[in-house]
Image (spheres, coloured by chain):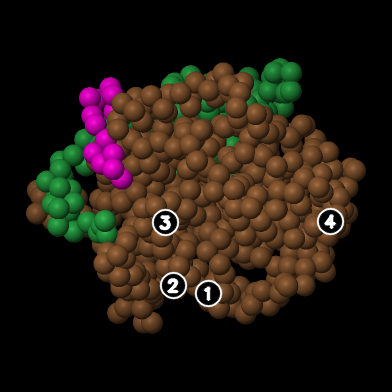
Amino acid sequence: MKEFKNLISSAAPLDAANVDTDQIIPKNFLKRIERTGFGQFLFYEWRFDMQGKENPEFVLNKKEFKDAKILLARDNFGCGSSREHAPWALQDYGFTVIIAPSFADIFYNNCFQNGILPIVLSSKNVDALFQHTLANPSAQYEIDLPSQKVISKDNSALQFSFEIRAALKEKLLKGLDDIGWTLQFANEIEHYEKNLQISFN
Amino acid sequence: MGKTLFEKVWEKHSIDLSGNPSAPPQEENKNLIYIDLHLVHEVTSPQAFDGLRLANRKIRRPDLTFATMDHNVPTKDRDKPVKDQISAKQMEYLAKNCKEFGVTLYDLNDFNQGIVHVIGPELGLTLPGKTIVCGDSHTSTHGAFGALAFGIGTSEVEHVMATQCLVQTRPKTMRVNFKGSLKPGIYAKDMVLALIGKIGTAGATGYVIEYAGEAIEKLSMEGRMTICNMSIEAGARAGMIAPDAKTFEYIKGKEYSPTGENWEKAVSYWKTLVTDADAVFDTEVEIDCNQLTPQVTWGTSPGMVQGIHTELPNPSSAPDDVTAGSWKKALEYMDLEAGLKISDIKLDKVFIGSCTNSRIEDLRVAASVIKGRKKADSIKLAMVVPGSHRIKQQAEAEGLDKIFTEAGFEWREPGCSMCLAMNDDVLEPGERCASTSNRNFEGRQGRGGRTYLVSPAMASLAAIHGHFVDATQEVTV
């Protein structure tokens, strides 16, 4: 897995709560058997009209947000289906950081499997980032994982710390693969299977 | 202090790493949990199998891994080749992968094929006290048996395949007490929708819910599965219900259930899987079932749910700006006006099926309320999609299929169908559908489609009337 340490980028403000993984990547694009190439379908039904033409109103289609690598979102981002195609699509499109007041459980875990950093900030602080970004679409933010900070590059008052579990932080910083980690415990797993596993057959 | 049901199952499956120098410190809350059953389907597994191949890994326990095809499968013309070439390829790929890695597969032509969360219990693979995962968020369904069951992403599917374990943080515990009893015409679906309406779609994020109380004890296994199924719509990692005599009766004699002496041993263990009287939950919620009315979702999130006798909310009365924005956006998408009565929403289609409500009891209820009646002319399509071949066969033996077809409903082959509309069962833009499924997200049943989540009785009656009516007025038993 690719490692993540820090990033300086503009942010795209997606002002909607409860954005579900069906919106992030609609089901008609889940039939592929590859892990790659999902970015073109990200937020498909919001990005494109019925004829496949770009919807100029949608935030990601606005020129000023095209290069953003940070996505600002509202509560419960990534709810619904467990499809990992959602983080695959976000990453393939170019997002490596998502900032929201809360994330759905499975989506949050899936991000860490793919080198995406989901940052939880209070609603008030997320709102401040929305306001600042809407007023200054090209505003740059520095995301620093080692110090756990979101820093506005043009407004020193806008600086927030975020919490992240140590194990997840390390996983991103080192690009660690869970399977490799777990296989260190092959003996313990075998011991469990031989002595402790419940089986009635 | 006593333990909750969840804690008992969790602790039994936590692998002791303390003797290993690489063990993570306890404060990291990084646990290795052993998985007893891994269910696999065609959509979220191809990339996991590829990962194994790439790393030259095997499936550690193919004997604990079972696969079926459900998400993509057509629900009619099964004797002909699958028309959608990309879906067909995904199914062929699953068959090829299962063969290569030695996994039991119930494919399109197998009698055991069906929705993964329906067939697990039917086969006796789902048992109390097990840890069960699947690359599908509705894996929470299996918690109805007192299993700890939850959905995972594809990377975790690969992880379970390679190690039979998962890296997990220990979730918090929530108990939902359903007090009182259900009036005729009120069902498990109304209970869980009312819960989601109360606590919100993120209300249980970070928690495993245990459902308890008089109303839960009285529910059939089918009803309990409906409730656990939608735990994820409240944000929970999993939902669980303590096993009891009904659970054991359901399991007994199933293909993979323990037999003979093993059965006795199993039951005596399963009886210990209850929350101790002095156990403490991180949080508790109470729902009074005596007050429940039939629930209908009106918007684009399962939390946008109200009783049948209410009117659509006005964004100006929302508790905060973000909610007001969500309501406004939902009303626009659904093309509805604030203040409209729920019962005045005109419907185009009806879907009875999905891992939430496609079991025999659901079909019995749906059939009983329409026996001898006809669907309204304004309903373009009413379809019934049983969850499995066993259910289909059982329903046909009871003559339910005839009741449906005589009322003008279509009777289909098992699969996920219009719950997520990955196959040909798709809403046209703008169509309104009464659905017994679990998600009313924008475009869930087809781009531009509008979904209203209800119980099977409510859906079936909506097909007769062309709009929602109060099931408690038409159901007497």
Disc 1 target residue? B217
Image mark 2: chain: B
Disc 2 target residue? B244
Query: Crowding at label 3, few (<14), some or many (≥20) Cα neighbours within 10 Å?
Result: some
Disc 3 target residue? B254
First along the sequence among labels 1 and 3: 1
Residue B425 screen position, x and y as percent: 68, 34
Direction front: furthest residue: B397
Element type where label 3 sits in the image? loop
Judged by depth in the image, the label closer to the viewer, 4 or 2, is 4
CA separation, marks 1 and 3?
22 Å
Q: What residue type is labelled 2?
A: Asp
Element type where label 1 sits in the image? helix
CA separation, marks 3 and 2?
17 Å
Residue at 66% over, 65% down: B187
The answer to which image quadrant residue B29 occupies is bottom left
Disc 4 target residue? B372
Image mark 3: chain: B
Q: Give the range drawn in magenta.
A: B52-64
Q: Are marks 1 and 3 on the same chain?
A: yes
Q: Which amino acid does label 1 sit on?
A: Glu
CA separation, marks 4 and 1?
33 Å
Question: Between B435 and B359, which is closer to the camera in this rendering?
Answer: B359
Q: Do the residues labelled 3 and 2 touch (CB within 8 Å)?
A: no
